[in-house]
Image (cartoon, grey):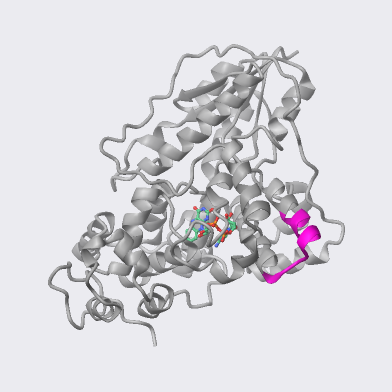
Amino acid sequence: MSNHQVLWLRNDLRLHDNAGLRLAAEAGLPVCIVFILPPQWISKDAQGLNRLGNAKATFLRACLIDLQRSLAAANLTLHILSGDPVTLLSRLTGRDGILLTAAPQAPEEESWIRQLSQQLQVQTYTAQTLLDREQLRPLLSDWPQTFSRFRRWLQKQTDLSIPADESSETLSLSDHPCSVSAPASWPDQPGADIRLPLNGGERIARQHLQNYLWRTRAVRHYRETRNRLTGTQSSSLFSAHLAWGALSVREAWRQLQAWEQVHGTSYSVRALRDELLWREYFHWSLVVHGASLFRRSGLRGCAEETVTETPAAAENWRAWCEARTGVPGIDAGLVELQRTGFISNRLRQNMASYFVHELKLDWRLGARWFEQHLIDADPGSNYGNWAYIAGVGHNPRENHRFHLNQQLQHYDPQLEHLRLWLPELQEQTVEDILRHQQGKYLLTSYPAPVAVTSDPG
Ligand SMILES: Cc1cc2nc3c(=O)[nH]c(=O)nc-3n(C[C@H](O)[C@H](O)[C@H](O)COP(=O)(O)OP(=O)(O)OC[C@H]3O[C@@H](n4cnc5c(N)ncnc54)[C@H](O)[C@@H]3O)c2cc1C
């Protein structure tokens, strides 16, 4: 007989619509609620990367502080621990306890939960997606190669609906003491100049959803503005809240449906819903394909090539990390990402395309760099999009190389974004920048491009 429960929160840092809290309340046993910072998030790998850059750490910390406050108001404690999840959780749960946690997405989480299940009683639940595994079962054995096939399948399922709210806010739970002492040592951020585009935490996330839909109704212009490089209302900015689960994606979906009922449907609302389906598609694609997505050949599944890194590759990688590739349109994005933890979708596409097709670097390194810095880093969406642009993910036959000079002319014709992040280029015109990044006429005041941007024909 179990006498206590451990609730391990990972990407469901919220009270609303939280199946873990509901399950814990239903079992009626005291609960020890934990968040764990694994060592591999903080320690640097051979390329000097970790998984918790300064902006991302600041955002996550805000999410955790907010959750700690909300739980404290219900006389519950959130224990923030640091260490190997398998070791800590087996000690905390022991033979007498039950471990509750969200179903895994990435192979690393899957491996932790598999190891724990071999020693303990573990119960998983859905926390990050619109649909449950059971609802998608017919697709999981034959995952659609393209997003449009996935969407068509969904449209045909007339009986498919988003599961009801797991509302747990009013549930009563009692605290179980934490039997291990492994307080998280938060990474230091000496001299970091962080300018988050938004703050973390459930309260802010839900307020943001209300503002975006109901108060400012910014959703009305989503389709027209979503490709802009600047602006806090150009796109929804839901991603970071969704990635840490401070906002339930089902709650966002339900609110969008409610908005449509009041204001009528529109291209914009449908486009935003489609993007949430992209997120769903990449999430389940990673669950289905597991570790194979992380190969250099990705989902193409051919034999792994042996890659000899050239001195040029090392030079290109260094220039990328220092935000000095010599291509201002790219460098501006690199600076923005390191300072704010966020860049627009358009810029992510341009930067990934430059990394893969011009710098000719291993796409996985670029994905890991994004993963370190993005406040919305999510393994399915991040690796899925990178593999897509590298031509080794979904839709591999399409050409995903972007025309970077055209992109600059189209999306930053007044150099508004570029000058915001590279103030040293205040005096230059768009023609100066284009000539420089094409290697035609170099600016004396800016590094020469390590790889010029010749647009594909
Ligand atoms: C190379 C690359 C890496 C990316 N890495 C991530 C990542 O780690 N985490 C992440 O959430 N998104 C990622 N994206 C997708 C997309 O860029 C962001 O979700 C979006 O820019 C976030 O801003 P928003 O919330 O305002 O998006 P909106 O345009 O308002 O879209 C609403 C929501 O739909 C989802 N969404 C939108 N576009 C995509 C997409 N292309 N793929 C999957 N979901 C999408 C997100 O949850 C987003 O919050 C990546 C895209 C590229 C090209």
Front one among 257 and 41: 257
Magenta residue check for 203: no
Q: Which residues are magenta?
A: 256-267
Magenta residue check for 265: yes
Left/right of residue 398 with respect to residue 73 in the rendered view: left
The residue lying furthest to the bottom in this view is 457
Q: Is residue 404 visible?
A: yes
The x, y position of residue 79, in whole percent, is 53, 21
The x, y position of residue 271, in whole percent, is 65, 67
Q: Kindly report the secondary structure that dominates the magenta region of the rendered protein.
A: helix
Q: How many marks?
A: 0
Left/right of residue 299 with respect to residue 254 in the rendered view: left
Q: Quadrant of residue 278?
A: bottom right
Q: Residue at x 77, y 48 (%)?
A: 134
Q: Is residue 360 visible?
A: no
- Looking at the rendered image, the quarter that the N terminus falls into is top right
Q: Quadrant of residue 185?
A: top left
Q: Residue at x 71, y 46 (%)?
A: 251
The x, y position of residue 153, in whole percent, is 76, 65
- Looking at the rendered image, the quarter that the C terminus falls into is bottom left
Front one among 122 and 356: 356
Location of ligand 1 given as a quarter of the image? bottom right
Front one among 435 and 135: 435
